[in-house]
Amino acid sequence: MGLKLHRFDWVAEFIGERSSFLRPEFQETLPSFALAKLAYEQGQLARALQLAVTVEARQPFLYFGAKTLQLKVFYELGEWDALNSLLESLRVYLQRHPDLGYHREHYLLLLQFARRLLQLSPVDRQARAALREEINDAKAFREREWFLRQLE
């Protein structure tokens, strides 16, 4: 919530003060992930990427959170080869882990929409409008806002 409200100093302080209260298996990974999200929201893309890469996630929600953040940074920096490699690794992960429950649908949509976004021609207004409509219609898609911004 602090990120949405742009209370960045408070978020940084909260992460620093509260990390020790996490269960031991989360005390390194979760603060790194939270700091990566903070850096991203502050526009510090290189730092966000640096922190996201260090997130050693055995839990699928942290793994995909870090990878989603990397996807955004790679796209915004125009790192197309890295982005394509990341999308392929996510595809393989999803293939190997069919037990993700309702989260699986979201991550499949993330992959589908990211690949389509990469293939779009900047001048093809019709294709952009079609993708925008599909993104808006996707019920289980939590990254809608970011994707719609990229289509503007």
Image (cartoon, rainbow, N blue to C red):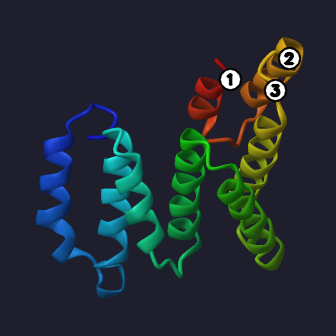
Relative to 120, is 9 on the left or the right?
left
Q: x and y percent of residue 137 in the render?
A: 78, 27
Q: Which residue is mark 3?
A: 131
N-term-proximal mark, 1 vs 3: 3
Q: Residue at x 77, y 21 (%)?
A: 122
Which structural element holds mark 1? helix
Quadrant where the image shows the N terminus: top left
Relative to 5, is 140 on the left or the right?
right
Q: x and y percent of residue 147 in the render?
A: 64, 32
Query: In the rendering, which numbered label is found on residue 72?
Result: none
Alpha-carbon neighbours of circle 3 within 10 Å: few (<14), some, or many (≥20)?
Answer: some
Quadrant of the image occupied by residue 130:
top right
Q: Is residue 61 above or below residue 97?
A: above
Relative to 8, is 130 on the left or the right?
right
Q: Which residue is mark 1?
A: 151
- Tell me the kind of residue under disc 1: Leu
Q: Is residue 34 above or below residue 141?
A: below
Relative to 90, is 28 on the left or the right?
left
How far apart marks 1 and 2 lie (CA) works out to: 11 Å
Instruction: Give the residue furthest to the bottom.
Output: 24
Query: In the rendering, which numbered label is found on residue 124?
Result: 2
The answer to whether the residue labelled 1 contacts the one labelled 3, judged by CB atoms less than 8 Å apart, is: yes
The answer to whether the residue labelled 3 contacts the one labelled 2, judged by CB atoms less than 8 Å apart, is: no
Q: Residue at x 37, y 75 (%)?
A: 29
